[in-house]
Image (cartoon, grey):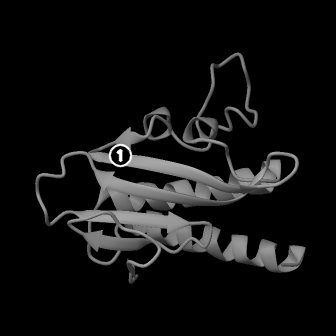
Amino acid sequence: MGFKKVLTRRVVVIMCSAALLSCGRVRGYNSTGATDIQALNTALIKYELRFGGFAPNLKALGSGYLDEGLSANAAGLIDSVLASGTKAGYHYRYQPLKPDAQGKYHAYEIHADPVDDSKHDQPHYFTNETGTIRVQIGRQADVNSSPEKQ
């Protein structure tokens, strides 16, 4: 894909991210899981634009120590709680994919699953580098789950 197409796609995803984050809900679910997975999509796109590939892990999207400054290992794009992988009742599993010869990743998947899965009516979320958020009620979402409607 050409640079212009990639950049255009990234700008559209960032604009959609801002709109979703401002309303705090996706498809009627007032869920922290949906909001935080969208925040991760936005952070990953910003990281890719800054460092030439997607982050190697969630921790790299967070902040380092104050004296370290911002870097590819601590980009300062998400809060430290989300960077830990568990926030507000959801566990976030990030998987970088398609590394190139320089070790930069060009695809990813994120699963957001409730920490307490004893209630079978809770939404589970999935997203990847396309920015589409998918949802599955009661079980883990994947690339084949229904896309969220805005």
Residue furthest out toward the top:
67
Residue 24 location in percent, x, y?
37, 64
Q: Nearer the viewer, residue 101 or 7?
A: 101
The residue located at (56%, 74%) in the rendering is 16
Closer to the camera, 139 or 81?
139
**Mark 1, residues whose alpha carbon is within 10 Å: few (<14), some, or many (≥20)?**
some
What x and y, as percent, mark residue 17?
54, 67
**Position of 108 compared to 127: left or right?**
right
The residue closer to the viewer here, 64 or 54, is: 54
Quadrant assignment for the C terminus = bottom left
> Mark 1: which amino acid?
His
Location of residue 106 by image quarter: bottom right
Give how far across and how far down residue 127 sits, in percent.
Answer: 49, 66
Give the residue at x 50% y 72%: 19
100 relative to 120 in the view: left or right: right
Q: How many marks?
A: 1
Q: On the rendered image, what quadrant is the N terminus found in?
A: bottom right
Relative to 50, residue 70 above or below: above
Dot 1: element: strand
Quadrant hosting residue 12: bottom right
Q: Is 25 drawn above or below residue 53 in the view shown?
A: below
Position of 19 with respect to 56 (left or right) is left
**Residue found 61% across the figure and 59% down from its top:** 108
Task: Give the x, y percent position of residue 79.
Answer: 50, 38
Q: Residue furthest left?
A: 119
Q: Which residue is mark 1?
A: 91
Residue placed at 79% from the left, 74% from the top? 6
